[in-house]
Every structure is written in C-alpha cells, then in structure tokens.
C-alpha cells in the first residue's frame, strides 16, 4: 500500500508528467513515486557551535528514511547565534528567526506536498520555530535535537557560555585576573553542541520529549556522541512509521500534552523563554493556553533537578542520571502528567515510560525524588500588577528572597544600562528598568543576558532587581522579571516609569507594582507619545508590524 497521500498531488497522473520529469533529474526512479516524500529540515550551519554538528545527524536520518522506504528531501532552515549576537543590535533578530524558521518549514512541507517532515535543529529558536512550522503544516513529523555541548573546564571548574558572560562583570569589577578571564573565554565552549545548562535550547528540546514529538532520551545527548547519531537515525525510522500510521502532530499536541510539557519544564527548572514559546506553540496548534495556565501548573509541580544556571549540573549530567524519562516517570507516578497522551511512536507517554525506574539512582544528585524536591513549587512565576497588567515572567529559583522594593533606574536601551552597570552606577537595592525592548518596540524582544550576567559578575545578582519588556536568556538568573506586558512601545505602564520611582517585585505575592498614585500615572499617560519605529523596512519592521504581545507568545502567524 502506498503511503503518499499528500505527495501524490504532485507525482501521480498524466498532468503531473512535468513534475516527475524534475524528480528524474534528482535521480528518482518510477517506483519512487509510490513512496512517501519525507522532508528533512536541516538547520546545519557553521555560524554557531549549536548547529555546526548537525550535518552528520541529517545524513544519518536521510539514510534511515531511505532504508525505511521513504524518499528523503533535504531543505534548509536558517539560524542566528543568540550567544554571538547577545548584547548587540543583532540580538533583535533572534525571536524573529523563530518565525522565519516556522515559515520555512511550513512553506516547504506544504508547497511540496511532503508526506512527513523531520526537523533538525540546535540553537534556541530552532526548536519552537520548527515546532510551529510542524503544527501549521500538520503532516506527520518528528523533532530531532542536535544535542548539547559538553562542559568546558578551567582550573578544575566546569564552564558554560554563561561563565564567559559572568566573567565580563567580574573582570571589569577587578575581582578576576586577566589569566582567568582569558582562560574562561578560551575554554567555555569545547566542542559543537547547544549551550550546556538548562538554558533555552535544552529546555525546549527536553519539553519535546514530554510533548510526545521527540524520542525519549534524545534531548540530553551530547552533540558529538555516538548515541546522538543513532537517535537521529531511529527518529527517521519512527517518522516513516508515523506516516504509515497517519499520526499527525495535531493528534499529539493537545492541551493535555502541552500541560505535560510545561510540567516537565517546571520540574527541570527550565528557561523563561519556554513561556513565550509554548504560548506560540499552543497558538499554532489551536489550543487554548494562557499565562494563567503556567501559573496553575507551577503551583502543583516541584523543581526536581539541580541544573544550571541557578543549580550545579549540566545537561550531560542529567543524561547520565537518567535523562528526561526519569524525570517524567517521577511526575507520572505522582499524578502530575497525563499518561494517556499519544506520542510520535504511536505509544502513549505512559507506555514509553514503562521500563524507566520508579526512583532515581541513589548515586547521583542531579534528579531528586519528590520528597526531596529542591523547591516545593515551580520556578516560572507569572507576576501581575499596575506595571504588568497583562502579566510578566519571573524565574525565582536560586534566590534567597524573591522580593525587592527599591528606586527605579530607567534605561531605554540595553547599551546604556550596560555602561551604568560596568561603571558601578547601579547599587544594591536598585531596580533597573529596561524598556522599549518588547516585540514591537525592540523590535524582537532581545535577550538581556549581557546586563544580567554583568550584575551577577559584580556580585549584584540578588541585591538588584531588573525588569524589562524584553526577554532573558535561559542562562539568566537573579532578581529579574521579563516579558512585561503591555510593553512600553504600546503605552504600557513600564513606559511611564521615571528615574527614582519606587518599584516592588514580590514573587511571593506574584506582584509587579509601580508605587505611584493613579492620578500621577494618568497625567504621565496623557503626556506620553509613542516613539517612531526603530526600523521602517526589512524583516524587523515586518515583525514589529505583525507581532502579538508577549502574553500571546509574540506570534506573527
């Protein structure tokens, strides 16, 4: 029986003779037109170590798809390096790239009537972008993560890319030698692979196991390791079977499976960016999911994994400790997962976890049992108040006290804030306000890893608050609140903050409040004028015109 229900639109019948002629140019034979056409969306590039190791994985997947009876069709998707663009104007293209990747996947799968698609990615936006494209097309699909980087080392200490960002603050403060500064810089990234803590790339890839759209154990494998190649090949074989069974992404990605993914994100202490991306994924899937749902899940799911940036261990350590399946099994046994959700293998999530131990190994400290959870509740808190009427996101793990009230230090761009931090003009008790950095105002919601890491490097991570209508890197920790909505460019209250105003951040009360009388705020609002757009043509102007607010995932499609 042929399994080419979609591709037959361009390969079957007399009228499609010109189409077949072009396939013959690619080496196809007549029998191939009865086989499923399987897209391989390959994000390989030599722009970043996150994606530089993808080509061998694509080759392994292509060979497996062909052996399983499919016709692999490779096409590209772009990426930019968040780590390399961080702190520059280039970072504004990061979130935009999520939408571009989604458009690439949707365009090729739909335009070519592909019967299925394997999406292969590395850097942060590859995962949500690929998944959004998968859901828009709704052809059988699987996600293959390129794998995590291995830890770097310097003088016996494990390093990640965040170590280099934090070293900037320490070196500029005079608390780090030039030898150590250069040693960290040269050794932080020892091989190909995505940033090694539970930062955004590893957070999103891990969540895809819980979502049911990626193979178990695949998200915590190191990029150079043999098991990563074997997993990529197995993903190709599983996808061909999913095509034969007609298992579609919208059969898998439901409100219940998204709740599973978010529960997993809370348990592993994942990135704040996961909030933005799952709002966008839910939108693409036609699922009703809001900020309030994140808060609902947070209250019932404990943090079980001691992972960087606020913890001690890396993704490779999590893999050795049992990986994401071990965490999922703990959550399943506690009644915190919907075990009946379908996965891309055709099995339920509970069935996929059947052989996973009920308790983590006693000889590891990465994954804690529920009775020894690091935190009783999840770490991604949704704050509201007059400064964020539509919500904001705070990451509250690793803080002695997730509350601060202090004077506002106001900046309308990232660079001026960095100058103030590095010049020691920011003091303990201050609340730094970074604004006009939202989806429309930035545009593109750039990440603020450079200023947050500089604060940590200068010993101010817990004593200085920072709020922004932009985003944070998955490597950020500290007294920080992002995704403030409405954003400044749209006239949100964050646009009305003046130097010296008192601001309260209180994660216990889920409060983000500007301590200014309503009458005074009304006067300021009446005097406020929307600034001119920073970009009036090109992709950033297009994103600014189309993007929805952060509390709706900043989606454009």
Image (cartoon, rainbow, N blue to C red):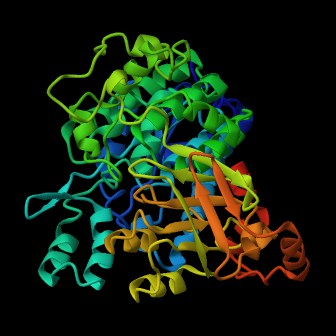
Q: Nearer the viewer, residue 169 or 285?
A: 169
Would you say 73 lies left or right of 322 here? right
Decide: is 223 above or below 138: below
Would you say 239 lies left or right of 281 here? left
Can residue 444 be seen in the rendering of this structure?
A: no
Q: Which residue is drawn at 34% across and 65% down?
A: 46
Labels in figure, total = 0
Q: Residue at x 39, y 24 (%)?
A: 68
Can residue 506 be seen in the rendering of this structure?
A: yes
Would you say 260 lies left or right of 332 here? right
Q: Which of 492 and 162 is in front in this view?
A: 492
Residue 44's x, y, as percent?
Answer: 39, 56
Residue 443's x, y, as percent?
Answer: 67, 72
Q: Nearer the viewer, residue 367 or 285?
A: 367
Residue furthest left in the image: 155
Decide: is 412 above or below 456: below
Decide: is 139 above or below 394: above
Q: Which residue is drawn at 36% across and 68% down?
A: 456
**Which image quadrant: the N terminus?**
top right
């Amino acid at each position: 029986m042929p399994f080419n229900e979609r591709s037959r639109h361009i390969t079957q019948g007399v009228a499609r003779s010109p189409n077949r002629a072009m396939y013959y140019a690619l080496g196809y034979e007549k029998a191939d037109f009865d086989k499923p056409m399987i897209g391989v969306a390959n994000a390989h590039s030599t722009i970043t170590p996150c994606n530089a190791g993808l080509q061998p994985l694509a080759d392994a997947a292509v060979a497996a798809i062909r052996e399983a009876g499919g016709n692999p069709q490779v096409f590209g998707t772009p990426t930019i390096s968040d780590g390399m663009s961080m702190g520059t104007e280039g970072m504004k293209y990061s979130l935009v790239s999520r939408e571009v990747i989604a458009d690439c996947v949707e365009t090729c799968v739909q335009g070519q009537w592909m019967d299925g698609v394997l999406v292969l990615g590395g850097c942060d936006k590859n995962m949500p972008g690929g998944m959004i494209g998968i859901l828009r097309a709704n052809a059988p699909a699987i996600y293959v993560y390129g794998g995590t980087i291995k830890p770097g080392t310097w003088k016996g200490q494990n390093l990640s890319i965040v170590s280099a960002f934090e070293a900037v603050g320490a070196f500029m403060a005079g608390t780090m030698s030039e030898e150590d500064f250069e040693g960290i810089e040269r050794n932080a990234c020892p091989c190909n692979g995505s940033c090694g803590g539970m930062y955004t790339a590893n957070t999103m890839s891990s969540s895809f196991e819980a979502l049911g759209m990626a193979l178990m154990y695949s998200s915590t494998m190191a990029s150079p390791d043999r098991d990563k190649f074997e997993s990529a090949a197995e993903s190709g074989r599983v996808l061909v079977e999913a095509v034969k069974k007609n298992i579609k992404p919208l059969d898998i990605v439901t409100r219940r499976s998204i709740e599973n993914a978010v529960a997993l994100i809370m348990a592993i202490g994942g990135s704040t960016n996961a909030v933005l991306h799952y709002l966008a994924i839910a939108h693409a899937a036609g699922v009703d999911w809001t900020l309030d749902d994140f808060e609902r899940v947070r209250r019932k799911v404990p943090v079980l994994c001691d992972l960087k940036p606020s913890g001690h261990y890396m993704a490779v350590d999590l893999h050795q400790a049992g990986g994401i399946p071990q965490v999922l099994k703990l959550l399943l046994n506690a009644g915190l997962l919907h075990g009946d959700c379908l996965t891309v293998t055709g099995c339920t999530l509970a069935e996929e976890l059947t052989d996973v131990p009920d308790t983590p190994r006693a000889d590891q400290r990465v994954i804690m049992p529920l009775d020894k959870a690091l935190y009783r509740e999840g770490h991604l808190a949704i704050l509201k108040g007059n400064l964020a009427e539509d919500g904001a996101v705070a990451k509250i793990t690793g803080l002695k006290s997730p509350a601060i009230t202090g004077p506002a230090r106001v900046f309308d761009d990232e660079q001026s804030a960095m100058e103030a931090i590095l010049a020691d003009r920011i003091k303990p008790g201050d609340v730094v306000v970074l604004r006009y950095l939202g989806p429309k105002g930035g545009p593109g919601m750039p990440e603020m890893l450079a200023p947050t890491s500089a604060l940590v490097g200068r010993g101010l991570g817990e004593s200085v608050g920072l709020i922004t209508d932009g985003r944070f890197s998955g490597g950020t920790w500290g007294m920080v609140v992002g995704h403030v909505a409405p954003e400044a460019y749209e006239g949100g209250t964050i646009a009305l903050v003046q130097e010296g105003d008192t601001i309260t951040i209180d994660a216990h009360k889920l409060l983000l409040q500007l301590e200014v009388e309503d009458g005074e705020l009304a006067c300021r609002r009446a005097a406020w004028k929307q600034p001119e757009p920073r970009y009036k043509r090109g992709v950033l102007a297009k994103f600014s015109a189309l993007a929805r607010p952060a509390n709706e995932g900043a989606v454009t499609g």
